[in-house]
Image: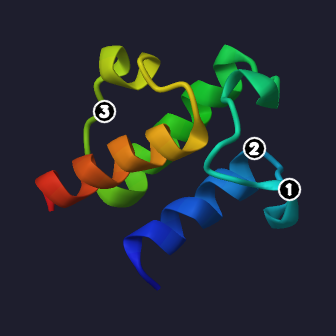
């Protein structure tokens, strides 16, 4: 399984999303997730990929695609 596939699996599972309803264009705000759910997701990703995320950079992402691109870049940079 690629890093992108693993990341997507984690996001879908943690946010309880159906893959059929998921797209890179989705607004993060449209998911109606609270800050605790987002924090749990980010901690899971940090632990799974042994990376440290920059909250300030993450807050600049508006869509799931932007978030994925940032996360995959961090995974690539720190591996």
For label 1, the SS is helix
Q: Of label 3 and label 1, which has the lower sequence position? A: 1
What is the crowding at mark 2: few (fewer than 14 residues within 10 Å), some, or many (at least 20)? Answer: some
Please determine whether, in this image, residue 51 is positioned above or below residue 42: below
Question: Please, is residue 13 above or below residue 32 in the view?
Answer: below
- Figure quadrant of residue 35: top right
Frontmost residue, 27 versus 41: 27
- Mark 3 to mark 1: distance in Å? 26 Å
Residue at the disc numbered 2: 15
Q: Where is residue 65 in the image (x, y as percent from the top left)?
A: 52, 46
Report the disc number at residue 53.
3
- Name which residue lies at 79% across and 31% down: 31
Q: Name the residue under label 1.
A: 21
Q: Residue at x 46, y 48 (%)?
A: 68
**Label whose residue precedes the other's in the sequence (2 or 3):** 2
> How far is mark 1 from mark 2, CA to CA?
12 Å
Q: Is residue 57 left or right of residue 6?
A: left
């Amino acid at each position: 399984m690629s890093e992108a596939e693993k990341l997507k699996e984690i996001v879908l599972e943690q946010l309880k999303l159906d893959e059929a309803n998921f797209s890179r264009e989705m607004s993060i705000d449209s998911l109606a997730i609270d800050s605790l759910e987002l924090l749990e997701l980010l901690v899971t990703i940090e632990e799974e990929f042994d990376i440290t995320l920059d909250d300030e950079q993450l807050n600049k992402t508006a869509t799931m695609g932007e978030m994925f691109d940032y996360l995959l870049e961090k995974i690539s940079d720190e591996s």
